[in-house]
Image (tube, rainbow, N blue to C red):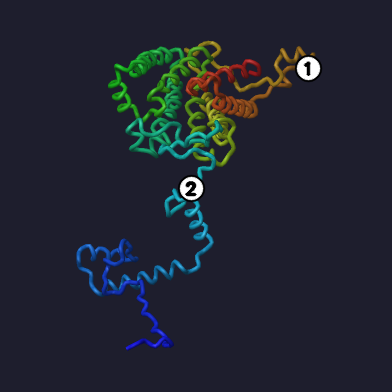
Amino acid sequence: MPSDPDAIPETPRVTSPSPVPSEGRSSLGDYSGPITRSAARRQRLGEVTEEADGNSKSESKRSRARSRSPSTPAESARRRNRKSNPKLPAGKPKAPTNGHAASNGYLSPLAKPGGGWPDISRSPSPLGLIPLHSRYRTFIHRHEIPRKLLHVSIGFLTLNLYSRGIQPLQITPWLFGALVPIAAIDVIRHRPEFQKVNELYIRCVGALMRETEVSGYNGVIWYLVGTYTVLRFLPKDVGVMSVLLLSWCDTAASTFGRLYGRYTFQLRKGKSFAGTLGAWFVGVLTAAAFWGYFVPYIGTFSNDPEGSFMFTGRLNLLPDPVRNLIGWTSDSSSSVISGPLALGVMSVVSGLVAAGSEFVDILGMDDNLTIPILSGIGLWGFLKVFG
């Protein structure tokens, strides 16, 4: 039958591109809609049920609804950051380094790029060279409790020997006798052919070491050298006081610096105002207790050498050479102080000497050597002029 040219053609049937449920998952290609973990697990086991399919569809609808819902400004900012930086993994944003290099996995931070001063580290050395440091990160590595206990105990041992009437010149041979083998072992263990000796050494005394001492010399060597020097060449009270300042003020500076150094300003690289203030405060207490209580309580001994005590409870605020220089002819006793006032002045000066010797850095030398020697020289010089 011929077609009518004026007839309107039928509207063609348009098939939806979306697959019908009967076509199954194979027509979806690589696409897989949102699905819960439990449903995915059942799918892998071949136990998918109609109920699971319903749950998957409802979960997909909820996910699409959440993606279209308005988000908070913080979430929007995180999405923008992820889009602008495709290398940044999704999830928690990377914490800023505040001008520092990224962490290397050690407890101590890396230095600032460009040679700036680093933040005061709670650990003076890296982590990983000594097994005990890795095992007891807080007790040994971060707070150095065994090392500090040994440091502090030397002060109490010194007072015990003092109270028994043992003179400094009787102690120095023992110090030198301990110095020789300890220094010899330290030299031997750094030779390449004695690597096993170094490993055994670290295993035995690693709890008392810093990890910088694995390839360097042990601080005990400098401790022995410093105490030997002040006890051998300075008067008895000044020498003993120098050892006490090394034992207690250095420990106080390290402890206060690590606890509160982040809240105060830095005086120089690695030295905070909190640590220096702690050294001064402990130095004042140590001098007041030693010269104000311990020395009078113990008294003198028959074998005390002549000139053993430079501080006898009196200070001359205007020494005779200065008086003669300015032409002051008045009675010298008017410028002499004694009793609690003299003890207070001596204590404050001792604290300043301790804090200064702990603060000063002489060519990078170990503070176990510089603190007793500088403290001894400072106390001896002050008492030589005003004592």
Q: Quadrant location of the C terminus?
A: top right
Q: Is residue 327 above or below residue 51?
A: above
Quarter location, residue 66: bottom left
Provide residue 142's location: percent of width, then percent of height. Answer: 42, 37
How many C-alpha atoms fall within 10 Å of the one at disc 1: few (<14), some, or many (≥20)? few
The residue lying at 76 percent from left, 12 percent from top is 324
Going from N to C along the chain, the mark reached first, 2 or 1, is 2
Label 2, label 1: how many angstroms apart (C-alpha)?
A: 70 Å
Q: Element type at marker 1?
A: loop
Q: Residue, x 48% and y 18% (percent of image)? A: 226
Apparent side of residue 270 relative to residue 24 in the rendered image (left or right):
right
Is 37 displayed left or right of 76 in the figure?
Answer: left
Position of residue 344 measured from the top left corner of the image (x, y, whole percent)? 62, 29
Q: For mark 1, what is the residue?
A: 330
Q: What is the total number of numbered labels drawn onto the structure image?
A: 2
Q: Amino acid at mark 1?
A: Ser
Q: Residue furthest top?
A: 306
What is the x, y in percent for residue 328?
79, 16
Residue 384 or 330: which is nearer the viewer?
384
Residue nearest the observer in this picture, 67 or 109: 67
Q: Is residue 40 above or below residue 237?
A: below
Image mark for residue 95 = 2
Q: Amino acid at mark 2?
A: Ala
